[in-house]
Image (cartoon, rainbow, N blue to C red):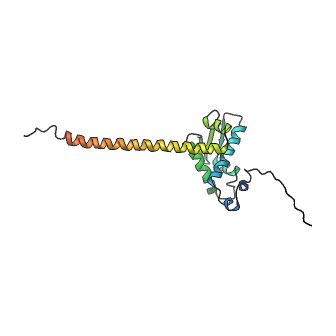
Amino acid sequence: MSLTLNLFISVNIYENPGVLMTTSESSMMDSRKVKILILQMLKDMVLNARGQLITFRPAKVAQDISVWTRKSPRSESVIVRNFLEELVELGFIKVIKRSARGKVYGIMRGTEFWLILEHKNVHDILSYIDGYKARKSSRNNISINMFREVTNAQKMNATQTATDGGNKGLPSNP
């Protein structure tokens, strides 16, 4: 006689993000899943905040979402640092402090990103960030193209001025 026992266990995704993945994925975490976990952690921090500012270091974020532990190489937290830097470049978070231990990032209460974290789903937030990034890069491409067009126009104008202006001082011989 065999006895099968089904147990339902509550698992904290911060302690064991591998439950979200298959065994082949668990060795190399998908960057999108890591970003989702980072956003979920930031969302939890915002919802539990009592002050006007939340601060965090990339290593602590990586450790809390189990991407990196003291036993594993620090290079695994590169995805975390890159994502946080991306959020800084987009203007969502700020670098509060730089030290020998690295950067301390922060989010102020009442900012757009704080409100988004408070009221939106993490998947929607990541889609919003990706869309914002695409809009911002297309604006940069437009401004780069405009800069190139202005530069080319200035070059053409300078060339035309040099050829026309060079003959102005000479008397014309019929």
Image point (78%, 51%), residue name: 11
In front of the other: 14 or 122: 122
x%, y% of residue 42?
67, 43
Where on the picture, by quarter, is residue 113? Answer: top right
Q: Is residue 25 above or below residue 151?
A: below
Q: The C terminus appears in which quarter of the rendering?
A: top left
In front of the other: 2 or 104: 2
Spot the residue most to the bottom.
Answer: 1
Spot the residue most to the right.
Answer: 1
In front of the other: 61 or 41: 41
x%, y% of residue 118?
68, 37
Q: The N terminus appears in which quarter of the rendering?
A: bottom right
Image point (50%, 44%), residue name: 137
Left or right, residue 5 beside residue 145: right
x%, y% of residue 117?
66, 39
Left or right, residue 160 beside residue 80: left
In front of the other: 148 or 2: 2
Where on the picture, by quarter, is residue 169? Answer: top left
Left or right, residue 13 beside residue 88: right
x%, y% of residue 141?
45, 45
Image point (61%, 57%), residue name: 75
Left or right, residue 25 beside residue 98: right
Q: Is residue 22 above or below residue 60?
A: below
